[in-house]
Image: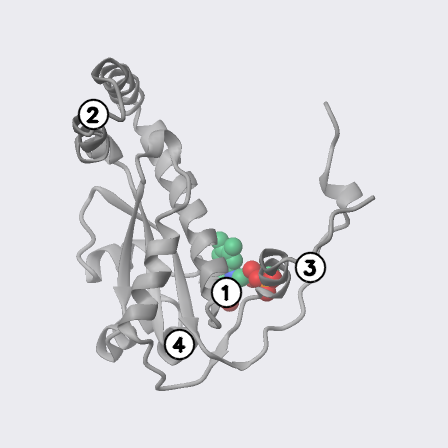
């Protein structure tokens, strides 16, 4: 017996595809943008350190500046907004603002916070760990953003095709953050091109290889 897949979430998952052509000159209301970003930040993250930062590019001048950096991909200038999802390689600096208030509110014992903090600081000594956690966790936020956008009636396209070094330089990205992907968000003008998926028996292995 299979579970019903008629829930809203499954509908959203099934219908989300990468839309490349958007209704031009549509401005996303600020409250939609806020709702979208709020939902995005509910994504899970390692130690709940929320290793992400979102650069919201909505001004047409900045989109034009981004266009050549993203190799001329038109969704950059035609969508309502482009959100650059950045990974935070120094998310250990979030320990205090995230865990401090929980301790103060009596929701987390100080001793547990201290143990977590020492684990985290230990792990973040390793720059490879810091890098991997930044990409891993900001990618979860990116996926959440795309599904939340779809639920809200918007479409998206994730983009890894952009010159990361140039983006860092021209958008003054602080060294702490690494660009993960750009996501265009807007109202679809033309539906996404069909995309295929490999069958489960080619992508699933049970118990061990
Ligand atoms: C990390 C990542 C990078 C991608 N980069 C680009 C890109 O630069 N340009 C583009 O048009 N699509 C890009 N895509 C979209 C994929 O081509 C698309 O997700 C895939 O073909 C499956 O199609 P669907 O999203 O419509 O289901 C990217 C997707 C991901 C997840």
Q: Which residue is mark 3?
A: 6
Circle 4: element type: loop
Please identify the quadrant where the N terminus is shown.
top right
Q: What distance separates the C-alpha of mark 1 from that of mark 4? A: 17 Å
Please identify the quadrant where the C terminus is shown.
top right
Asked whether the beta carbons under mark 1 and mark 3 sit within 8 Å of each other, the answer is: no
Q: Which residue is mark 1?
A: 151
Q: Is residue 103 left or right of residue 35?
A: left
Asked whether the beta carbons under mark 3 and mark 2 sit within 8 Å of each other, the answer is: no
Q: Earlier in the sequence, mark 3 or mark 2?
A: 3
Q: Nearer the viewer, residue 4 or 53?
A: 4
Give the residue drawn at x 30%, y 28%. 127
Q: Is residue 21 left or right of residue 55?
A: right
Q: Is residue 103 above or below residue 183?
A: above
Q: Which residue is mark 2?
A: 103
- Nearer mark to the viewer, of 4 and 3: 3
Q: Position of residue 92 (x, y in %)?
A: 24, 30
Q: Determine the image quadrant of residue 58.
A: bottom left
Q: Tell me the crowding category of disc 2: few under 14, some 14 to 19, or many 20 or more residues within 10 angstroms, Cα based.
A: some
Q: Nearer the viewer, residue 44 or 180?
A: 44
Which numbered tag is attached to residue 79? 4
Q: Can residue 73 be seen here?
A: no
Q: Position of residue 40 (x, y in %)?
A: 38, 53
Q: Nearer the viewer, residue 10 or 52?
A: 10
Colour scheme of the rendered structure:
one colour
Q: Determine the image quadrant of residue 136.
A: top left
């Amino acid at each position: 017996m299979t579970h019903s897949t008629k829930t809203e979430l499954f509908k959203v998952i099934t219908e989300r595809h990468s839309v490349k052509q958007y209704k031009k000159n549509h401005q996303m209301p600020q409250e939609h943008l806020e709702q979208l970003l709020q939902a995005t930040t509910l994504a899970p993250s390692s130690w709940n350190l929320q290793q992400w930062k979102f650069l919201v590019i909505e001004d047409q001048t900045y989109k034009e500046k981004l266009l050549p950096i993203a190799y001329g991909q038109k969704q950059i200038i035609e969508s309502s907004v482009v959100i650059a999802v950045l990974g935070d390689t120094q998310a250990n600096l979030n320990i205090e603002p995230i865990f401090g208030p929980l301790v103060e509110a009596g929701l987390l014992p100080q001793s547990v916070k201290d143990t977590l903090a020492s684990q985290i600081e230990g792990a973040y000594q390793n720059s490879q760990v810091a890098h991997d956690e930044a990409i891993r966790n900001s990618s979860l936020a990116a996926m959440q953003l795309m599904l939340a956008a779809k639920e809200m009636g918007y479409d998206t396209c994730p983009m890894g095709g952009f010159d990361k070094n140039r983006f860092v330089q021209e958008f003054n990205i602080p060294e702490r953050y690494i660009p993960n992907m750009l996501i265009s968000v807007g109202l679809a003008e033309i539906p996404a091109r069909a995309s295929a998926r490999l069958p489960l028996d080619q992508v699933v292995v049970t118990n061990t290889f």
